[in-house]
Image (cartoon, grey):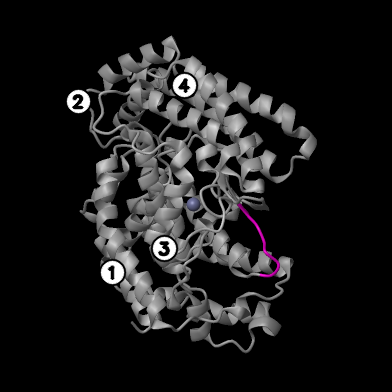
Amino acid sequence: MAKSLDHLKELLGVVSDLGSAAAVLGWDQQTYMPPGGAGSRAMQLATLSRLAHTKFVSKELGEALELAKAEAEGMDPESDEFCLVRKTDRDYQKEVKVPSEWVGEFSRVTALAHQDWEKARAESNFSLFEPRLEKIVSLRREYASFFAPYDHVYDPLLDDFEPGMKAADVKSVFDTLRPRLIALVQAIAERGKPIDDAPLHQSFDEKKQWDFGVEVAKAIGYDFNRGRQDKAAHPFTTGFGTGDIRITTRFDPEFLNTALFGTMHEAGHAMYEQGVDPKLDRTPLATGTSLGMHESQSRMWENLVGRSKEFWSATFPRLQEFFPDQLGETDLGDFYRMINKVERSLIRVEADEATYDLHIMLRFELEISLMDGSLAVKDLPHAWNKKSEEFLGITPPDDADGVLQDIHWSGGMIGYFPTYSLGNLIAAQLWNKINDDIPELEKKIAKAEFGDLLAWLQKNIHRHGAKYEPLDLLKRATGQSLDAEPYLQYLERKFGEIYEL
Ligand code: ZN
């Protein structure tokens, strides 16, 4: 009888319930809550998060963990129990190192920083945000110091989002990625064959956009019996146990892509969470293993499936039925090119596949310099603009469309950005393996059959939840380490064909 393990699970179940309850409140906050609820909701969320944290780092849980560790010794290292103890121990050892004064100060500063950032962005004036960002950078350095010794001061930050990964790993794949992406985007620009995507910019009825999005989400495998979709200003996926994983979307009445690809993206995140083995519910294992692995799933469905020729050869006629006036006369091949239009643009969240990672690398390099002290916060806007010119060939006209565009730094989330690109890399590596294992995959997608693809992902990725760290899971699924080559080849092949390079 694994008595200590059972006791540990009981305690973790309580922590998980508190987290889920907070997540329900968070979901409501961003979907249905009236503005007047903001003040008390912030208190409720803070109380629940504090309770969950206190319970997690409690003496009782620490003792139960020690006993469970002894009990787990000699167990099969692939068993749920062994992985649960290992993951809990890893999280616990991290959380107990962070003093509660630091946590309080960090949440105070980031709450204020958020307000300052909004104002600074609205007025396009970095200096309004600068003092607060300086404080955030110094708090993040202090955070890293709790985990000394480390190879790089960035490592402890990255580890929170991408367990087990180091700045050097990211740097190495980005060094491979950067020159070839810059060359690809350059070649597309020099080709001088811009794509006219005017048909995507017309009036599209919101109700019809909603219905089409739901149809696509269902078709690819998002389970509405264990989920639902609502509207939100900034789309996200959230869940409260594997039986209730929700997505949100937003609409642009004048642009088709926003809701369509946004819905596929969030459904990709949600299918990952829906695919986690229900046996892991109410434990720290009942979720995706990292942000990068999560992004590999969302971007696979959004881009590798959703922006492919095969997908639209099956689905475009249906889209035309929804929007006969707007797209009835549009040719399938033209539509495929429109949704894959490459453009040097300022804003990351609107970037196409070819330029997207350049936006990420710019941020990663600046974060590294901020953290190692080689770049002062006051010099950040200048450094941003210089890198933008170097990577993307454009200089932002102002700070709002440059250094102030993303919310992440105001929330203290330094170390987060690389996970977006890691997701792209991982998606391409998985995609190659999936195509080896399912030789007919493209044909199936062209018939709108997604069952085999989803089953592969469930078997090799989803069901494991957070049992394995991301690089370990990637190795188990593909036999490979992290590698930029498959992703580069995918982009060069795809855009080489579209732009006839
Ligand atoms: Zn995402």
The span from disc 2 to disc 4 (Cα, nearest Å) is 22 Å
**Which of the two residues, 120 or 153, is positioned nearer the viewer here?**
120
Q: Amino acid at mark 4?
A: Glu
Q: Which mark is residue 489?
A: 1
Bin the neighbour count of mark 1 within 10 Å (Cα to Cα): few under 14, some 14-19, many 20 and up.
few
Tag 3 residue: 392
The reply to whether callout 4 and callout 1 are in contact (CB within 8 Å) is: no
Which residue, given by chain and number where applicable, does mark 2 sit on?
A: 74
Name the kind of residue labelled 2 in the image. Gly
| Closer to viewer: mark 4 or mark 1 | 1
For label 4, the SS is helix
Q: Secondary structure at mark 3?
A: helix
Say whether disc 4 or disc 1 marks the residue closer to the N-terminus. Answer: 4
Residue occupied by mark 4? 10
- Mark toward the viewer: 1 or 2: 1
**Residue at position x 41%, y 22% from top?**
95
Identity of the residue drawn at 53% across and 81% down:
335
- Contact check, label 2 and label 4, Cβ < 8 Å: no
Sequence-wise, which precedes: disc 1 or disc 3?
A: 3
Residue at image location 41% in from the left, 63% down from the top: 392
Q: CA distance from mark 3 to mark 4?
A: 51 Å
**Drawn side of residue 248 relative to residue 68, left or right:** right
Going from the N terminus, do you reach mark 2 or mark 4 first? 4
* Of the image marks 3 and 2, the number of the one nearer the N terminus: 2
- Alpha-carbon span between mark 1 and mark 3: 20 Å
**In which quadrant is the C terminus drawn?**
bottom left
